[in-house]
């Protein structure tokens, strides 16, 4: 059934956390570009890509209604399904 996110709160990624990772996936090209720029001078920067393999943005549902969150969840699920073969 999955893990409860009832107590989860969004927060801004911190540079010191990101440089420990191998890859970072973003929902939008703008987020990808921002992180790539922020990490450009780091000697061990992770690969930063949009979650959707074709670079398509996944719209952030923050502040939206239930349908917006459902659409984002479906888009994330579809992107993960497309990425799965490269992760296995």
Image (cartoon, grey):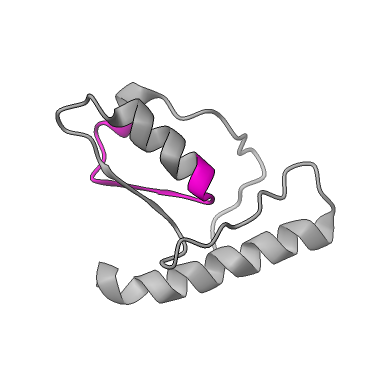
* Quarter of image, res 73: bottom right
* Quarter of image, res 35: top left
Q: Residue at x 44, y 67 (%)?
A: 54
Is 1 left or right of 62, judged from the image as shown? left
Q: Residue 30 location, x and y as percent? A: 52, 42
On the rendered image, what quadrant is the N terminus found in? bottom right
Q: Residue at x 72, y 43 (%)?
A: 62
Q: Residue at x 82, y 57 (%)?
A: 66
Is 56 left or right of 87, judged from the image as shown? right
Determine if residue 48 is in view: yes
Nearer to us in this view, 12 or 9? 12
Q: Residue 71 location, x and y as percent? A: 71, 65
Is 7 left or right of 67, judged from the image as shown? left
Determine if residue 17 is in view: no
Q: Residue 79 location, x and y as percent? A: 49, 68
Is 54 left or right of 59, judged from the image as shown? left
Q: Residue at x 77, y 58 (%)?
A: 68
Nearer to us in this view, 87 or 48? 48
Q: Residue furthest left?
A: 43
Q: Which residues are magenta?
A: 17-30
């Amino acid at each position: 059934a999955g893990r409860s996110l009832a107590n989860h709160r969004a927060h801004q990624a911190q540079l010191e956390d990101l440089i420990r990772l191998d890859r970072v996936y973003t929902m939008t090209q703008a987020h990808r570009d921002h992180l790539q720029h922020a990490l450009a001078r780091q000697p061990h920067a992770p690969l930063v890509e949009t979650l959707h393999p074709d670079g398509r943005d996944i719209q952030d549902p923050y502040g939206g209604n239930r349908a917006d969150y459902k659409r984002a969840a479906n888009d994330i699920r579809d992107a993960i399904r497309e990425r799965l073969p490269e992760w296995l």
